[in-house]
Amino acid sequence: MEQFRQPQWWQHEPALTRVVRDLVSAELAAAHPGRVLPALSSWPLDPDLVADLGADSLDLMGAATSLADLLGFARTGSEDALLAQTRLADWIAAARASLALDDTELTFRTSGSSGAPKRCSHRLAGLWREVDELARLTPGRRRILSAVPAHHIYGFLFTVLLPQASGAALPVMDLRGSSPAALASMVAPGDLVVAHPDFWGQVAALGTVFPYDVIGVSSGAPCPDATARVLQEGGLRLLQVYGSSETAGVGWRDRAGEPYRLLPYWRRGGIERTIERTIDGVEERYPLQDWLDWTDEERFVPGGRVDQAVQVGGTNVYPAYVAEVLGMHPGVFECVVRPMRLDEGTRLKAFVVPCKAFAPESLRTELAAWIAERLGPAERPAALSFGPALPRQPNGKPADWIIDAWE
């Protein structure tokens, strides 16, 4: 079977710039959840992280640590190459110099928000192995349109490695500064549009009609079958990829409602909730984050997550963690956080029982500021409901609530 050439991805300046820029932007935003950073599309060509983006010494240390971890600076003795610099171009140059010495492994972090993202290391050769398969599933692409960050594993595979898989780097256009409504006027035959289910849900709601030979990719969370069918009716071939930061891609499907098919180098694990593969004669077993319903040895349908994480805007969020943060406010007696119903939206919602000394009206205002200071955008409940007791079923088990009935 033909193998695609595996170039040194970091020698392609736009690719390396996207990875470094996206990571720095995410780290600065996470360091100050209430601070509004300039949109990436409005950054200067070579921003100074302090003068232009408002970073302080702790912000720089956090971003430098994350970048060094992602690219393996420790393997080349380059751990201290960033802190003496404040310009993004110097960080990119330091990244390039370190990768020139050793680019064999990358360490991604989960997009979760429990306060301690998990580190997930991957050999570059293994990532190229997946890209070889992804290139066969998306042949003939001329351009990549991306609504996902390049420093997470999904974005790295599809917007950094895949564009270089055939040897001639494809152009990559960033969609994050554009509304999903603008996609119809931007997309062209031969495009690959890389996005997450929330983005595709908005595109589907607009009834977008796609030109011939456009492929979309969705990952990070299950794409609702109803969304996938609407997109398919609009002329889009939607490739849904199942995977995680720990495993990278595991399986794929391009028809709504059908099982996912394992990528050819994976196999069903001999232990429940695991998958296995063999690399260089070494067998590797990985635990899965979801329950899988296997239809045969090569096909499966994902069930719910074991760790109860949910996806908001392509980011893993943990409702229990968000409830814990809200519960630390002195005016909150108890609360519960859960995803909105399908007819309510795609964000989190919270039900709060106030302490007796706090009126709901004043507590709502205080909680808004509390949330903005402590939680990232995807974690913040978009609707707060108040009542004298948490919603429960007649048997005492927790119950859902309708936002409009309690607002």
Image (cartoon, grey):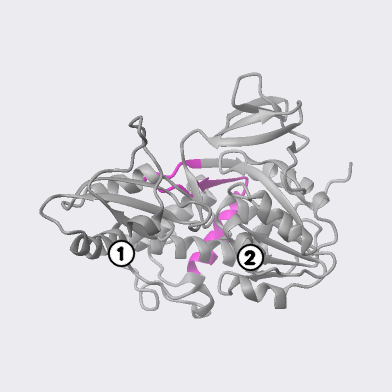
- SS at mark 2 in the image: helix
Q: Nearer the viewer, residue 172 or 98?
A: 172
In magenta segment, residue 47 = no
Residue 281 higher or lower than 179, as above or below: above
- SS at mark 1 in the image: helix
Dot 1 or dot 2: first in sequence order is 1
**Quadrant where the N terminus is found in the figure:** top right
Q: Is residue 298 left or right of residue 112?
A: right
Mark 1 nearby-residue class (10 Å; few <14, some 14–19, many ≥20): few
Q: Residue at x 76, y 26 (%)?
A: 296
Residue 337 in percent (x, y) is at: 36, 47
Tell me how far mark 1 sits from mark 2, CA to CA: 44 Å
Q: Nearer the viewer, residue 158 or 17?
A: 158
Kind of residue at badge 2: Ala
Q: What is the residue that sits farthest to the right in this orientation? A: 1
Residue 77 seen by the camera: no
Residue on which the image places disc 1: 57
Residue 8 in percent (x, y) is at: 69, 56
Mark 2 nearby-residue class (10 Å; few <14, some 14–19, many ≥20): few
Q: Is residue 208 left or right of residue 291?
A: right
First to last magenta residue range: 90-119
Q: Residue at x 12, y 50 (%)?
A: 356
Residue on which the image places disc 2: 205
Which is more foreground, mark 1 or mark 2?
2
Find residue 86 and report its image quarter: bottom left
Q: Which mark is residue 78?
A: none
